[in-house]
Image (tube, rainbow, N blue to C red):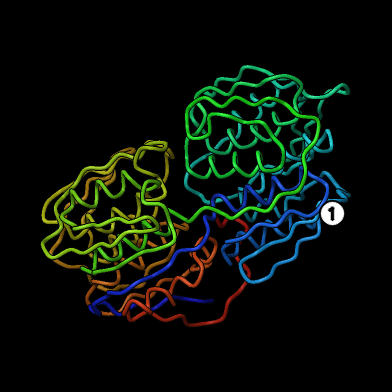
């Protein structure tokens, strides 16, 4: 089993470039199923989740070719509409093929999704929205079977009860070929949604309102392949910015749009960090004690749930107490027990984490409980006294390319040890 070993105390400084966004690349790969022919996607991160999604697409009959950070997905021939549990259980994002398969083939049989164990992440909104487009959905033996009407999908006015990213994506992709104009209210506004809208419009879709709470989709008869560059990963960028905040910096992060991470930057400044932004990145430095800052996660443009764990690691060394409120997922504090093993003073009360800053953390054996929690433990270990050994690092590999190498290039004393094995089916 592989582990990450971090010896704290080494100053970090320098420049790092982030990859394309995991949360966008996976959905664009699914969307490529909607057009016969070969679509080309560039700036694709070399991460485990992309490997899994490639397997899903190949199982369906698409041909996936990878070259460096580019993918060519030839979806000329779709030979199956079923995604087996063995694949879906390895990555929740594979549920995103539901909308494209229904749009392209008129049906889909998708195993109920796996993913990070950080909440129920129910797919009720996906199902309810697709039903409004005329899709018949049944559940049996752990699979969802979706079928479009014989005369095609019909446009609808859909209001989501919560701005779910996944539900917005599935509805958006199905609505692209529905007859008439579909309106999706209370839609997710994340930059990754905007990237998907741009991708689909490049394929010939007619979508307006990307980045707002109301999406309008004028149905088209068919789509064509596209060439598209994945937007920069704002969460990877935020992770390295918090690493700079924890260790002091200065650290420059390039390859992303700072406007996509605005609320995180606001909170980092409030925590006492000096931040300068430019077109494709930001520089962070901290020369004074960390100030305690309260944070509550919200859908975009609020503070992202995917940055909650990293920010808690920063608050663990703050000069005072802070309250972190998780409003998106009901069980995303699992890593807090591991951070406490390093000396952090954290008390969980429902969906609130009460964090009392300590003078210093100490290295300890810990395990990554999920993707972002694992990254948070690694950056907390940068300032811990002694050695921290992190296990279950396959979680980190699912969302970060060359994570240790990038931190090492900044000066961190971080290495990997052991032999890589197959990730359990519950990874995120």
Is 107 or 329 nearer to us in this picture? 107
In which quadrant of the rendered view does residue 206 lie? top right
Residue depicted at x 73% and y 50%: 85
Circle 1 Cα neighbour tier, 10 Å, few/some/many (<14 / 14–19 / ≥20): some
Q: Would residue 110 be found to the left or right of residue 246 on screen? A: right
Q: Quadrant of the C terminus?
A: bottom right
Residue depicted at x 40% and y 58%: 280
Residue at the top extreme? Answer: 157
Q: Would residue 406 be found to the left or right of residue 196 on screen? A: left
Residue depicted at x 74% and y 32%: 139
Percent coordinates x, y for residue 302 in the rendering: 35, 38
In which quadrant of the rendered view does residue 208 lie? top right
Percent coordinates x, y for residue 152 in the rendering: 83, 24
121 shown above or below 148: below
150 shown above or below 17: above
Percent coordinates x, y for residue 144 in the rendering: 74, 36
Is 78 or 87 nearer to us in this picture? 78
Percent coordinates x, y for residue 239 in the rendering: 37, 60
Q: Which residue is mark 1?
A: 61
Q: Secondary structure at mark 1?
A: loop
Q: Quadrant of the N terminus?
A: bottom right
165 shown above or below 247: above
In which quadrant of the rendered view does residue 415 lie? bottom left
- Numbered marks: total: 1
Q: Would residue 315 be found to the left or right of residue 6 on screen? A: left
Residue at the front extreme? Answer: 279
């Amino acid at each position: 089993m592989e582990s990450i070993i971090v010896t704290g105390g080494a100053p970090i400084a320098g420049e790092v470039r982030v990859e394309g966004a995991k949360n966008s690349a996976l959905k664009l790969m699914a969307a490529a199923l909607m057009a016969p022919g070969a679509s080309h996607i560039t700036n694709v991160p070399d991460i485990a989740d992309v490997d899994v999604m490639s397997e899903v697409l190949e199982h369906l009959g698409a041909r996936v070719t990878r070259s460096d950070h580019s993918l060519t997905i030839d979806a000329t021939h779709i030979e199956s509409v079923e995604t087996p549990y063995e694949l879906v259980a390895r990555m929740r994002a594979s549920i995103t093929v539901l909308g494209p398969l229904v749009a392209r083939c008129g049906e889909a049989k998708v195993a109920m999704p796996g993913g990070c164990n950080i909440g129920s992440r129910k797919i009720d909104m996906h199902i309810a929205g697709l039903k409004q487009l005329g899709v018949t959905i049944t559940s049996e033996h752990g699979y969802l079977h979706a079928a479009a009407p014989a005369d095609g999908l019909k446009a609808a006015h859909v209001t989501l009860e919560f701005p779910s990213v996944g539900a917005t994506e599935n509805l958006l992709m199905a609505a692209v070929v529905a007859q008439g104009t579909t309106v999706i209210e209370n839609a997710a506004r994340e930059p990754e949604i905007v990237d998907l809208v741009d991708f689909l419009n490049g394929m010939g879709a007619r979508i307006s309102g990307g980045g707002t709470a109301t999406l309008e989709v004028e149905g088209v008869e068919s789509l064509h392949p596209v060439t598209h560059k994945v937007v920069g990963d704002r969460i990877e960028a935020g992770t390295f910015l918090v690493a700079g905040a924890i260790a002091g910096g200065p650290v420059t992060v390039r390859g992303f749009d700072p406007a996509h991470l605005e609320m995180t930057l606001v909170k980092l400044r409030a925590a006492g960090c000096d931040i300068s932004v430019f077109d494709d990145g930001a520089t962070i430095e901290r020369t004074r004690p960390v100030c305690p800052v309260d944070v509550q996660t919200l859908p975009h443009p609020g503070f992202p749930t995917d940055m909650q764990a990293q920010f808690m690691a920063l608050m663990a060394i703050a000069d005072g107490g802070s309250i972190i409120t998780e409003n998106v997922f009901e069980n995303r504090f699992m890593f807090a027990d591991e951070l406490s093993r390093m000396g952090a003073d954290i008390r969980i009360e429902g969906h609130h984490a009460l964090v009392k800053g300590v003078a210093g953390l100490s290295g300890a054996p810990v395990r990554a409980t999920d993707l972002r929690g694992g990254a948070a433990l690694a950056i907390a270990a940068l300032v811990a006294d002694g050695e921290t050994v992190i296990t279950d690092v396959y979680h980190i590999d699912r969302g970060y390319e060359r994570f240790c190498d990038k931190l090492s290039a900044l000066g961190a004393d971080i290495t990997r040890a052991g032999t890589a094995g197959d990730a359990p089916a519950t990874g995120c």
